Image (tube, coloured by chain):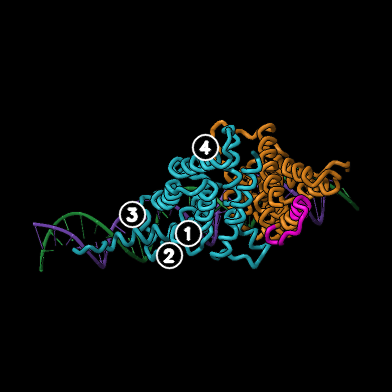
Chain colours: A orange, B cyan, C purple, D green
Amino acid sequence: MTDEVSVSERTRARLVEAAREVFAEHGFQGATVREICRRADANVAAVNYHFGSKHGLLSEALNFNRLKALQSAIEESDASPEMRLRMFIHDFMLMLLDENNASRQCQMMARELADPTPALDKIVIEAIAPLHEFMGRLVKEITGRKMRDVDVRRSVYSILGQCLFYRNSHPVLQRLTPALHYDRKEIEAIARHIADFSLFALQARG
Amino acid sequence: MTDEVSVSERTRARLVEAAREVFAEHGFQGATVREICRRADANVAAVNYHFGSKHGLLSEALNFNRLKALQSAIEESDASPEMRLRMFIHDFMLMLLDENNASRQCQMMARELADPTPALDKIVIEAIAPLHEFMGRLVKEITGRKMRDVDVRRSVYSILGQCLFYRNSHPVLQRLTPALHYDRKEIEAIARHIADFSLFALQARG
DNA sequence: TTTACTTTCAAACAAGCGTTTGATATCTTG
DNA sequence: CAAGATATCAAACGCTTGTTTGAAAGTAAA
């Protein structure tokens, strides 16, 4: 008995990792248990043995640590609110678009948003609601004036909408501009554009 | 023989209409032929008899007339470019969000964007590419200065991203603010916000 | 090694999918 | 009306899906 993990635990881990890949690529409905098991080099029955069901695996694969970490790192920063918004958009876009990213949670989440499964409630409560509140505080700090709640909310939607567009509409953008490729430089240019666009809009309102 | 349509043509029409509903609600993959036929009060075999396949029905159900009409109506207007952008966003949001809307084409398109089917190429060429070009011209008119193509494109993405967010993330927004309901007044308020936000951003850049 | 328990595996299951079939009903037309 | 073309129907087909099964293999402690 060493400090190494058992072979069973390694199977579990491979399944979760493969699940994140496949769910991120095809969404929950489009992903198949067989494909996940194939990538994890496991038997078809493994998912039901270890996680009870496909939904159980989804639930396990969802993990918001990176998103929470991003959020609290920025919240503890003493940069100006404008700079903090820039940092958030930058890091958020990297999580959303970078294909070599080890953490596909954001990509999975983005797919979930359109096609709700029972897991969506968990996502909203644990990750999305706190995220919106965090961004709402940022927006209020930036405009620096009294805003109606509904206007704060819609401004947050405007920022998030711009970010998510590049992921949700990726198949379309690929066809519109075939040369498009989300390497780090491109992602950072996109993030800069969204931050500029949003800050102009927020500050001009004063 | 009267000027009335034959019973067969009426079946076809009912199938197309039901297909638009179901495709808009569940996307192509999530929609089932049986559900479409049930709503159209037709036999399961009807889809394959009249359209060859589920894909054939999707192709038939796609229709960009309303989107094109909106576009050319605005293009022929002599209002200021700012006003034309407001008009476009207003009409576009009504098409996207109004649940009693007879034309679900935009809603179907919005769903297609994330989960491409072979029909996506047709959508992009016939509807989306012209739409982006139209909006690109509008953006250039509004800023009134020389812009790099990539900046024009990203500004268009910023505007469309805000619009599509309300549709793509509707299940999430519903959970975040349960009172949310897209009646005409709410849609117009949203359109006004997006137009304000975008115009501030475009004009401040000068 | 033996015993008890856990994990893997090939195979099968039931349900749902898009599609096909061949008979039946309904139109259209001479 | 009668004949031929067209449209509808219940039923089934072949396939894929998530899940279950019972035997085989692996693991751990006495």
Residue D25 left/right relative to B190:
right
The residues tagged by marks 1 and 4 sit, at their Cα atoms, a distance apart of: 27 Å
- Depth check, mark 3 against mark 1: the one in front is 1
Marks 1/2 in contact by CB < 8 Å: the verdict is: yes
Give the class, few, some or many, for how many residues have Cα within 10 Å of label 3's Cα (few <14, many ≥20): few
The residues tagged by marks 4 and 3 sit, at their Cα atoms, a distance apart of: 34 Å
Query: What span is colored magenta in the figure?
Result: A136-151
Q: Amino acid at mark 3?
A: Tyr
- The mark found on residue B49 in the picture is 3
The residues tagged by marks 3 and 1 sit, at their Cα atoms, a distance apart of: 19 Å
- The mark found on residue B39 in the picture is 2
Q: Amino acid at mark 2?
A: Arg
| Pointer 1 or 2: first along the chain | 1
Dot 2: what SS? Answer: helix
Marks 3/1 in contact by CB < 8 Å: the verdict is: no
The residues tagged by marks 1 and 2 sit, at their Cα atoms, a distance apart of: 9 Å
Q: How far across and down, in percent of the image, does residue B126 sit?
A: 43, 42
Tell me, yes or no, whether dots 3 and 1 are on the same chain.
yes
Q: Amino acid at mark 4?
A: Leu
Residue B84 seen in the figure: yes
Give the class, few, some or many, for how many residues have Cα within 10 Å of label 4's Cα (few <14, many ≥20): some
- The mark found on residue A176 in the picture is 4
Dot 1: what SS? Answer: helix
- What residue does disc 1 label? B22
Q: How far across and down, in percent of the image, does residue A143 sit?
A: 75, 52
Q: Amino acid at mark 1?
A: Val
Residue A15 seen in the figure: no
